[in-house]
Image: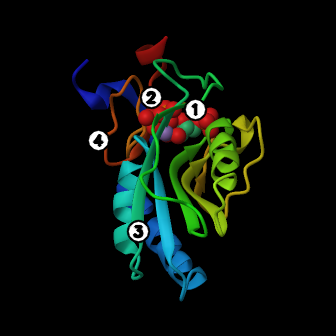
């Protein structure tokens, strides 16, 4: 339907909880990178909201770049095949890089990205993800900044989509099974 509310079962993380957590993470990142030049790399499209709110919660001046990759296509499961749809503009050589993600599900996207970035000569590389599904991990990702560990239900909102929809929802919510089954 065109009414978002009827497609959701429960709200998992509210807008307020998200913003409080991002404020906390931003303060931690500010302090960890004090005196260092930091490049935030957002993974399009899901990370758009996290990037907007996390970066503005930081006191530090940072650079922001974007990479577009996709592994999900139109389904609810990762294909495991990561495709670059848009590469970075920035040269990563000697840079302190923090990858900003909306969610770590199987971990396949980030594991591929971390390997790809490491080969570009970064000075350091860390990950910040708003959400993580520990029980869905196919590969372990060393993620320094995690917002919330959540169950394996398919969630949407705050950047996360199903078939490109629901990204503009302010909360993170569980998608009702009738939508995708
Ligand atoms: C989603 C999500 C993460 C990735 C996590 O992106 O935004 O980037 O999947 O899944 P994984 O840990 O199993 O790899 P998606 O490929 O759907 O592209 P999108 O950000 O454009 O929605
Ligand atoms: Mn994504
Ligand atoms: Mg997606």
Q: 35 or 50: which is nearer to us? A: 35
Residue position marked by numbered label 3 in the rendering: 63
Counting residues from the start of the chain, the first of labels 3 and 4 encountered is 3
- Could you give the CA–CA distance between mark 2 and mark 1, rounded to whole angstroms? 8 Å
Q: Is mark 3 within 8 Å of ligand 2?
A: no
Q: Position of residue 81 (x, y in %)?
A: 63, 25
Q: Position of residue 101 (x, y in %)?
A: 51, 50
Numbered label attached to residue 175: 2
Front tag of 1 and 3: 3
Q: Quadrant of residue 96?
A: bottom right
> Residue sitting at 66 percent across and 68 percent down?
124
The vertical placement of 164 against 92, above or below, is above
Q: Secondary structure at mark 1?
A: loop
Q: 154 or 119: which is nearer to us? A: 119
Do residues under tags 2 and 1 come within 8 Å of each other at their CB atoms?
Answer: yes
Residue position marked by numbered label 4 in the rendering: 168
């Amino acid at each position: 339907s065109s009414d978002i509310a009827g497609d959701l079962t429960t709200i998992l993380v509210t807008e307020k909880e998200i913003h409080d957590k991002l404020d906390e993470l931003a303060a931690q990142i500010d302090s960890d990178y004090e005196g260092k030049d930091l490049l935030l790399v957002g993974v399009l499209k899901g990370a758009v909201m996290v990037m907007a709110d996390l970066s503005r919660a930081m006191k530090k001046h940072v650079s922001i770049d974007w990479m577009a990759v996709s592994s999900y296509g139109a389904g609810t499961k990762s294909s495991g095949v990561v495709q670059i749809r848009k590469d970075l503009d920035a040269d990563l050589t000697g840079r302190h890089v923090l990858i900003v993600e909306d969610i770590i599900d199987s971990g396949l996207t980030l594991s591929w990205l971390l390997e790809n970035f490491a080969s570009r000569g970064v000075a350091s590389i860390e990950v910040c993800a708003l959400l993580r599904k520990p029980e869905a991990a196919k590969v372990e990702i060393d993620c320094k900044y995690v917002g919330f560990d959540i169950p394996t239900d398919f969630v949407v909102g705050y950047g996360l989509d199903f078939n490109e929809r629901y990204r503009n929802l302010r909360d993170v919510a569980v998608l009702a099974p009738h939508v995708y089954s």
